[in-house]
Amino acid sequence: MNDDAASPLLTGRICLVAGASRGVGRGIAKALGAAGATVIVTGRSSEAGPRTDQRSETFEDTAREVDAAGGKGHPYRCDHTSEREVDGLVAWSLRRFGRLDCVVDAVWGGNEGYDGERYPDGSGFGTPFWRRPVARLGESFEAGVYAQLLLAKAVAPAMVQMRAGLIVTVSFDTASGYLGDVFYDLAKAAANRLTLAMAEELKPFGVTALGLSPGHVLTERVRDAGLSDETTETPLYAGRAVAALAADAEVARHAGRVLHVADLAREYGFTDRDGSQPSRYLINNGQGGTDVAQG
């Protein structure tokens, strides 16, 4: 992939980025726009209504950034834990554009209410499992693997009919070690396993499903938590990875895998916003990425 973010590699492609109000999803939507794509951007934080965790960012902001980058942004409000809303989103997208070429699931609400130190139940990231309310596991799964399955289930029939399509799930590679928090680790491991299962079942129909593992990303939450110095990359790095994958006619070779953004940067030749190519994010002392790093 040419490092020039303005290179129109995806002109005419119809992409959907779920969970694009902020964080990695926003960076992915912007990069797809810079590559010339039409991008449907979704989220719950809207200019016209409630915003998650009282954050200022909205999916309408992201749609405008897609336009400014050179693409065509289309905002759509959707709660991705609601099957009715997800089905409505996909039906609207297909009526409006006729197809979906690339769908990116960056939805992750498992850490909502986290203030950088504590969750609403009083526990912190990494509190031992025997001191944690088990109910949070359900919240993590609903905002992660359940939402992932709902979106994939809704878009798969159209892609299967087309015998083409790419489904990318933003996750975290759990193969290299424990991610530092029992609920976060379980949710990401389950999401990665679902990606593998989807890839196997979609492969005969020419549809590719894969996972994407960013590093410690400089998102709005990270910045506001005063953790900018600990980050390894910006959301645009993951965005350029997705744009490269979407433009690759041989992307099916990656099916079922959880791909590190850093590895893709070296394979496709793209860089982060500052022209660097950050290396893989390493898990140190059992500490992995968190929603603060992603969303």
Image: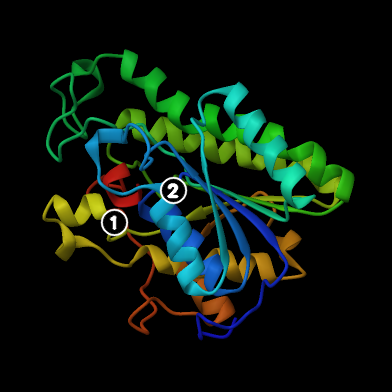
Decide if residue 67 is on the left or right side of residue 59. right
Number of the label disc, if any, that sits on residue 219: 1
Q: Which residue is drawn at 73% across and 68% down?
A: 12
Label 1 secondary element: loop
The x and y percentages for residue 264 are: 54, 70
Depth check, front residue: 9 or 234: 9
* Real-space CA distance between mark 1 and mark 2, rounded to the nearest whole angstrom: 16 Å
Q: Residue at x 32, y 29 (%)?
A: 182
Number of the label disc, if any, that sits on residue 283: none
Q: Which residue is drawn at 36% across and 47% down?
A: 58
Picture layout, residue 206 above or below residue 188: below
* Residue beneath disc 2: 172
Q: Which residue lies furthest to the front in this view?
A: 48
Residue 197 shows in this picture:
no
Depth check, front residue: 35 or 257: 35
Q: Residues within 10 Å of mark 1 (few under 14, many from 20)?
A: many
Residue 243 shows in this picture:
yes
Quadrant containing the N terminus in the rendered view: bottom right
Picture layout, residue 216 above or below residue 79: below
The x and y percentages for residue 51 are: 31, 36
